[in-house]
Image (cartoon, rainbow, N blue to C red):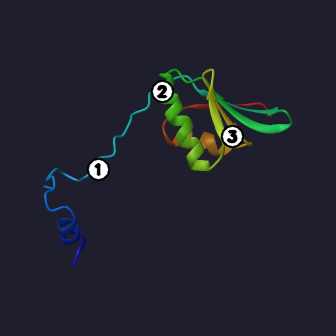
Amino acid sequence: MDLQEQLKKLFPDHEPSHESEEIVAETHELFVQKEPMICKYEKRKGKPTTIISGYEGTDEDFKLLAKEIKSTFAVGGSFKDGEIIIQGDYRDKIMKVLQDKGFKTKRVGG
């Protein structure tokens, strides 16, 4: 007995919907700017942090970019005052990812 038959026995009055079950992943196009994004390294309270700033698009796009970077490198971080703050020194890796997306980057500090 398969799952559909079991469900029919449990819910005899239910009419299954015949809508398309395909989930379409919505791709969001980021604004690629002419000016380079700044990737700098700082120590805050003795801990290394990578700060990305200089994005000219909307804050929502920048937040999506922050989320993608954090999940790609499995690190913590936040988005505050138009800057992405990543825990740890990941400048080189982040710059490579941004360049692969078409952004220009500039390394600052150390």
Q: CA distance from mark 1 to mark 3?
A: 35 Å
Would residue 25 be found to the left or right of residue 89 on screen? left
Residue 96 is at least partly visible in this image: yes
**Mark 1 Cα within 10 Å, few/some/many (few <14, many 20+)?**
few
Distance from label 3 to label 2 (Cα)?
22 Å
- Compared across the picture, whether 21 is left or right of 72 comes to left
Q: Amino acid at mark 2?
A: Glu
Point out residue 39 in the picture as x, y percentages from the top left corner.
67, 32
Towards the viewer: 82 or 35: 82
Circle 2 SS class: helix
Q: Residue at x 65, y 46 (%)?
A: 75
Quadrant housing residue 27 = top left
Closest to the observer: 1 or 48? 1
Q: In the image, is 4 to the left or to the right of 72?
A: left
What residue did someone put label 1 on?
Answer: 23
Seen in the picture, residue 12 relative to 49 is either above or below; the reply is below
Q: Which residue is mark 2?
A: 60
Q: Of 93 and 10, which appears nearest the observer?
A: 10
Task: Tell me the number on the disc at residue 91.
Answer: 3
Q: Secondary structure at mark 3?
A: helix
**Looking at the image, is mark 3 or mark 2 earlier in the sequence?**
2
